[in-house]
Image: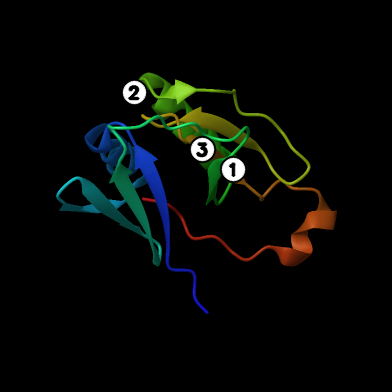
Amino acid sequence: MKFNHLSFPSKDVTATVDFFVRQLGCVAERFGDTAVLKRAGFDIVIEDASDRDVNWPHNFHLGFELPGIDEVRALHSRFKEEGVVMKTEVFYHARGSRFFCEAPGGLLFEINTRADAEQAYHAGFAPVAAVD
């Protein structure tokens, strides 16, 4: 079985898709009120939820990994400059440095690296390619 896609509701599909395209390098295809975002071998479906409330469970988030702490810090700086809703500064964690931010519609993102993770966590890590 292969991982195929994630699907999320958004009260503003256009703003959410713009975030994924501009900030995370996805390619978007629109199908009416729905968008399919392509990235690294899987799809992210953004569905129109303008007619209902969207309430994310506490700490539900998507995680994207970068090769190193310098890339994490650079993306954090760029997000701040571009007005992305930042939930944290860059901080160290035993599994690697990270920060949290929010996309339009309230979806929480973790941007991390495992390059500086404690050795105990390295056994399950695979190499990560650079992000454009």
* Local secondary structure at mark 2: loop
- Identify the residue under disc 2: 82
Q: Position of residue 129 (x, y in %)?
A: 48, 60
Which sits earlier in the primary sequence, circle 2 or circle 3?
2
**Residue lying at 31% horizontally and 32% vertically, measured from the top left:** 11
Return the x and y of residue 37 as percentages of the image width and height. Answer: 30, 54
How many numbered discs sit on the rendered protein? 3
| In this view, 87 is above or below 64 | above
Residue under the point 50% across and 29% down: 101
Measure the C-alpha gap from mark 3 to mark 1. Answer: 10 Å
**How is the protein colored in the picture?**
rainbow
Task: Kindly identify which residue carries mark 3.
Answer: 109
* Label drawn at residue 112: 1
Callout 3: SS: strand
The residue drawn where x is 82% and y is 54% is: 119
Q: What's under tag 3, amino acid-wise?
A: Phe
Mark 3: give few (<14), some (14-19) or many (20+) Cα within 10 Å. Answer: some
Give the spatial CA distance, label 2 vs label 1: 19 Å
Residue 118 in the image: x percent, y percent? 81, 48
Q: Earlier in the sequence, mark 2 or mark 1?
A: 2
Which amino acid, mark 2?
Glu
| Amino acid type, residue under disc 1 in the picture | Asn
Q: Residue furthest left?
A: 32
Q: Position of residue 71 (x, y in %)?
A: 51, 41
